[in-house]
Amino acid sequence: MAMDLQKTDLRALLIAMQTTPGTPETLNPATHGMLVLNGEYTFEVDELERETDKPGHGARQHVNVKRRSRYTGGIELRGHATPGTAAPCGRILRTCGFGETLDPGVDAVYSLLTSAFPIATLGGYNAGSLVAGHDARGALTQIEFSIRNFAKAQFEIMALSGATPVVDAALPNADYSAFQAPVAIETETFEVDIGGTALNAISLTVDTGAQVDIFEGSEQRIAFLREFYRPTGTLRVYKEQRSAFHPENVALAHTLADIFAEIVGGGEVVRLDLKNVQLGMARPSDQDGLAAWDIPFKVVGSTTSDCLALSFADEP
């Protein structure tokens, strides 16, 4: 049955962690629904032009190469109502190269992997069409903590496609009951710290630098991280703290300091840790007419600690 004249904002994403390469998992709307912000799900190919000589008018033909399914969107950074169990968004994080460590009753920590990246099976529903993919890997492209907003991240995932990559399909009745409402980032809930100094922060934005692509050879085709995570970003703070925090001095000293941002509320602590961060020179800025700094930074990390981690813990 053709699914014609469907509204374009009727979308859903199902995702299941995949056990065996080349063998897609069976997707179940009751257990594999993923709550996504402004998702887009497409099937793509590159068009390789045939540069043939022609005696007259007309365009050259092409050959389709590099078949892949692409899934992009945002996720709310929120853990499970039961501390120490997998965050509902954890399947996206794992597909994007994060390892999952669960401490029952305490927390769920997602830190970057350098090998043995998980794979996933996805089904992206968009206006009556299903874009199916398997052996998927991806990357978080941006993480944002911002006052009067909520914690969120953007992702891009690529997957291998079957013989029929796009089919007509009814929108599944996905179960999103595990997804808690995000906690508003406000004065009472937000904390940002650099090297032990609490800052009057407005926003913390991290651009990860990670990129995903398709590798293809005669024996194998896989999705992989073409560019590893090399996070950079901007921290915006109000300027009144120069007596306690002098960003120019920190930058000139080439000091590496840890940054963390926490949102506490709704029974949970959502925390972003950035390890061994080098600050750049602060740029004058303003927020609602008040003087502020925009402080650029790069996350150096080390061989013994993750450069970036997200955790979801029980509120003390």
Image (cartoon, rainbow, N blue to C red):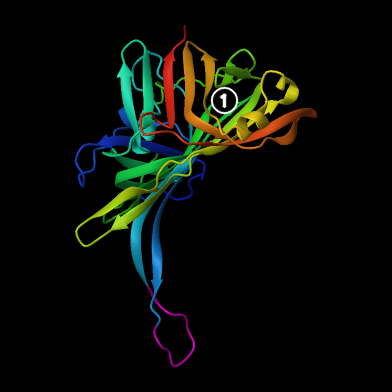
Name the residue that disc number 1 marks. 150
Q: Which residues are magenta?
A: 52-62
Residue situated in front as seen by the camera: 119 or 289: 289
Residue situated in front as seen by the camera: 79 or 201: 201
Q: Position of residue 205 (x, y in %)?
A: 57, 34
Identify which residue is drawn at 30% across, 52% down. Answer: 161
**Residue 59 magenta-drawn?**
yes
Q: Please indicate, yes or no, whether residue 288 appears anywhere in the rendered image.
A: no
Identify which residue is drawn at 72% across, 19% down. Answer: 243
Circle 1 residues within 10 Å: few <14, some 14–19, many ≥20: some
Q: Please indicate, yes or no, whether residue 149 appears anywhere in the rendered image.
A: yes
Q: Main secondary structure of the magenta part?
A: loop
| Residue 297 in which image quadrant | top right
**Residue 286 magenta-drawn?**
no
Residue situated in front as seen by the camera: 12 or 305: 305
Q: Position of residue 169 (x, y in %)?
A: 36, 45
